Image (tube, rainbow, N blue to C red):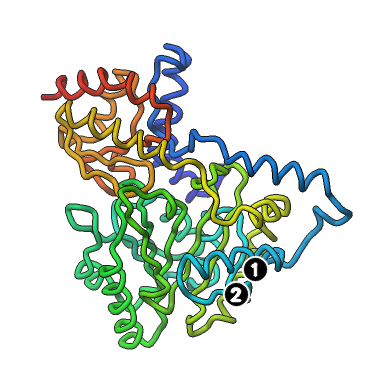
């Protein structure tokens, strides 16, 4: 054996998203990309706003010496201030640059947070279904991920979370709007969770953190707003990226925001600044920091995702699929018409439709459809969705 046992194990049980991506490559080679309907990846199909290219070009044309040099590990102070000013309005609280740390996307942010707060064998809870890479990130830092079931409509089950808390619990990670379900957790449920974590912190004699992974925060439907966790629990931390709302997943730019009311605010920020360096990120990409400083509050045209949601939901409903309409993000998580969701996803693949089994997200009996695709992909896939459900019934 030439590689670590842990990585070898991860490879043998690789992410279903990656497996379906590889399956898609084979199908596209065999049948032509235009004949394969790929709903496997949450890779935004919309181009960034035109202002992104304009700001990027202007920055390049006006570059000065030192534009690509190192900066403080948390990021450029003026960029962090721009983020803090916007967040203060968005969350209705006073956030300063001292509570912001620029990161290499939300994934980088989560790893920085977990590196900072976890001791070996600490436990991190997360509601299911969940983004599978949380397990990798927690184990990166010698922690253990504990999954907790949600209610049938994918909302938080506070009693289940309470039952899962032990003396080893250190944090809860939530993702709202959620990948893969599109569910948004209500303010009431988040306040209940905050109250629970406050009580348990006192009981256990250790601070329990609430970490909110929010890359889909601005992708919501029907006028629904995503509540601020900063008003629900003081020991809270947000990490997010510009991957989804600005369609910049390849640029790896995001940030961490720590609740200004956190008990150990200075320790958290100083620890995360060090962790950013220890993990090899050093700092977030310099050019992207400078660009997003001028794009606070801007997004792609979310109406296209709303249109796709309606097109997909109405089409699948007509075919007989059952699902909870997503309140946010760009995923649908229907029930599999048979108990074996892996087998049903294989049936869809026979119709040249690529989806991801719910098993890969800790949600067996379902499958995920990413609808950040062209409208014609949804329309042209509908006959295949219809044939697939008829095959198994």
Q: Is residue 348 above or below residue 282?
A: above
Residue for point 54% across, 42% down: 247
Report the residue at 59% width, 81% height from top. Answer: 266
Location of mark 1 (residue): 81
| Up/down of 128 relative to 250, above or below | below
Residue 151 x, y percent position in the rendering = 19, 57
Tell me if 69 is positioned left or right of 290 in this view. Answer: right
| Quadrant in the picture for the N terminus | top right
Percent position of residue 231, x then y: 39, 75
Residue at image position (58%, 68%) is: 84
Query: What is the number of callouts on the image?
Result: 2
**Label 2: few (<14), some (14–19) or many (≥20) C-alpha neighbours in 10 Å:** some
> Which one is nearer the viewer's eye here, 38 or 50?
50
Rendered image: mark on residue 338: none
Residue 51 in the figure: left or right of residue 6 = right
The residue closer to the viewer here, 144 or 245, is: 245
Seen as rendered, the residue at the extreme top is: 31
Classify mark 1: helix, strand or loop.
Answer: helix
Q: x, y percentage for residue 10?
A: 44, 45
Residue occupying the far left of the picture: 393
Q: Could you tell which of marks 1 and 2 lies nearer the N-terminus?
A: 1
Residue 14 in which image quadrant: top left
Q: Quadrant of residue 279?
A: bottom right
* Residue 313: quarter of image: top left
Q: Is residue 325 left or right of residue 35?
A: left
Relative image position of residue 307 (x, y in whole percent): 35, 35
Q: Are marks 1 and 2 in contact (CB under 8 Å)?
A: yes
Q: Which residue is mark 2?
A: 96
Helix or strand or loop: what does disc 2 sit on? loop
């Amino acid at each position: 054996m030439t590689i670590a046992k842990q990585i070898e194990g991860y490879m043998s049980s690789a992410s279903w998203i990656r497996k379906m991506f590889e399956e898609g490559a084979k199908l596209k080679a065999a049948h032509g990309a235009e004949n394969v309907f790929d709903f496997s990846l949450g890779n935004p199909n919309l181009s960034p706003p035109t202002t992104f290219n304009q700001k990027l070009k202007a920055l390049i044309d006006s570059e000065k010496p030192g534009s690509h040099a190192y900066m403080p590990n948390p990021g450029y102070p003026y960029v962090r201030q721009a983020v803090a000013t916007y967040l203060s309005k968005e969350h209705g609280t006073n956030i300063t640059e001292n509570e912001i740390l620029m990161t290499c996307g939300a994934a980088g942010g989560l790893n920085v947070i977990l590196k900072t707060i976890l001791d070996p064998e600490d436990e991190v809870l997360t509601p299911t279904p969940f983004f599978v890479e949380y397990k990798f990130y927690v184990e990166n830092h010698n922690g253990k991920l504990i999954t907790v079931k949600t209610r049938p409509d994918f909302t938080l089950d506070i009693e289940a979370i309470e039952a899962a808390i032990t003396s080893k619990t250190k944090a809860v990670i939530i993702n709202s709007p959620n990948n893969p379900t599109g569910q948004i957790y209500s303010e009431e449920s988040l306040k209940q969770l905050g109250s629970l974590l406050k009580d348990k912190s006192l009981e256990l004699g250790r601070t329990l953190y609430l970490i909110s992974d929010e890359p889909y925060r601005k992708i919501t439907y029907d006028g629904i707003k995503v509540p601020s966790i900063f008003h629900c629990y003081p020991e809270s931390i947000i990490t997010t990226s510009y991957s989804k709302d600005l369609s910049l997943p390849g640029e790896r730019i995001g940030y961490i925001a720590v609740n200004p009311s956190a008990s150990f605010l200075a320790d958290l920020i100083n620890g995360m600044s060090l962790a950013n360096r220890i993990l090899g990120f050093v700092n977030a990409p310099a050019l992207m920091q400078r660009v997003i400083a001028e794009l606070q509050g801007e997004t792609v045209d979310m109406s296209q995702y709303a249109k796709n949601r309606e097109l997909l939901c109405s089409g699948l409903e007509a075919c007989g699929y059952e699902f909870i309409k997503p309140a946010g993000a760009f995923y649908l998580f229907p029930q599999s018409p048979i108990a074996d969701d892996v087998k049903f996803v294989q049936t869809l693949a026979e119709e040249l439709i690529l989806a991801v089994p719910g098993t890969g997200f800790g949600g067996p009996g379902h499958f995920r459809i990413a609808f950040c695709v062209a409208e014609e992909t949804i329309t042209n896939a509908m006959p295949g969705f219809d044939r697939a459900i008829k095959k198994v019934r």
